[in-house]
Amino acid sequence: MNRVALEKKVLSENDRIAAELRARFKEHGVFCVNLISSPGSGKTSILERTLATLPKEARVAVLTGDIQTENDATRLKRFGFPVKQITTGGTCHLDARMIQRHLADWNLDDLEILLIENVGNLVCPSSYDLGEEAKIVILSVTEGEDKPLKYPSIFFKSELLILNKVDLLPYVSFDMDAAVENARRVHPAMETISVSCTTGDGLEQWLEWLEVRRNRARNERRNVVHA
Ligand SMILES: Nc1nc2c(ncn2[C@@H]2O[C@H](COP(=O)(O)OP(=O)(O)OP(=O)(O)O)[C@@H](O)[C@H]2O)c(=O)[nH]1
Ligand SMILES: [Mg+2]
């Protein structure tokens, strides 16, 4: 089999598992979100801030992906919610089978939000559907406002852009308006939220976004159950 045919086969197998996962998330009313960014843009920091703010009884869990180390899971477990590390051992993205395997001993009836932190990479994760309801791309202000134009696929597929590290704006030349304009050139309907995980600025907007989407998933489940 040539390389293109093999890649197509791998992706269609991934899409099959992702569709099964998506159907399960819908059936159980779980809002699943896939966070994608370059290494170090602040995915784990946003999740730390999120878990720190949610009430203890929140039905939330995290799967966090990395090539090596359990560091991110260790950081996130401190908040008392279920967290698992997915260590890919070299693969530069998560795939649907990894999600399926790591969910096997969690009861989806106990969950309303599943947060997935992808491996730090702006390219490969965009090709792998994980069964999520929404992809979110995070861009920090130290990375350059041209990134949506250079890595369009992930900006095209994500419905929300979180601009992180805005506390550093006085020290770096990053044009926020140009970054948003570039993202909207790739994806005109892109929603954007600016945050700082250091100061906490903007995080309430992100938490509101999450709550709206959690409620929508919950209501959709109710409608399916009563249909
Ligand atoms: N100044 C500043 N630093 C931040 C902010 N958010 C995160 N950082 C720092 O950026 C570094 C990377 O943050 P992480 O949350 O580990 O980034 P990540 O995207 O999870 O990284 P990988 O999992 O390795 O891809 C850490 O040193 C954080 O403390 C922010 O809003 N402002
Ligand atoms: Mg991380």
Image (spheres, rainbow, N blue to C red):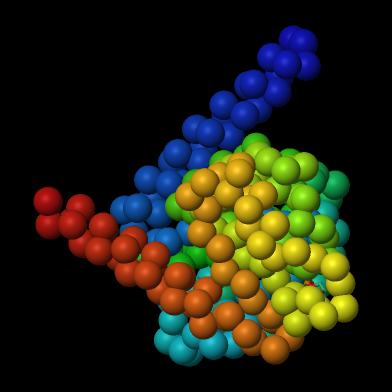
Q: Quadrant of the N terminus?
A: top right
Foreground residue among 61 and 49? 49
For residue 106, above or below residue 198: above
Residue 227 appearing in the image: yes
Q: Position of residue 183 (x, y in %)?
A: 63, 50
Foreground residue among 195 and 14? 195
For residue 162, above or below residue 119: below
Residue 62 appearing in the image: no
Q: Which residue appears at 60% of the width and 59% of the height?
A: 161
Q: Is residue 221 left or right of residue 11?
A: left
For residue 75, above or below residue 67: below
In the orientation shown, which residue stands out farthest toward the top? 1
Q: Position of residue 96 (x, y in %)?
A: 59, 44
Q: Which residue appears at 44% of the width and 81% of the height?
A: 58
Q: Which residue appears at 37% of the width and 70% of the height?
A: 212
In the orientation shown, which residue stands out farthest toward the left? 227
Q: Which residue appears at 52% of the width and 46% of the height?
A: 188
Q: Is residue 32 left or right of residue 90?
A: left
Q: Quadrant of residue 64?
A: bottom right
Q: Quadrant of ligand 1?
A: bottom right
Q: Position of residue 119 (x, y in %)?
A: 74, 55
Q: Position of residue 33 (x, y in %)?
A: 52, 59
Q: Is residue 90 left or right of residue 44?
A: right
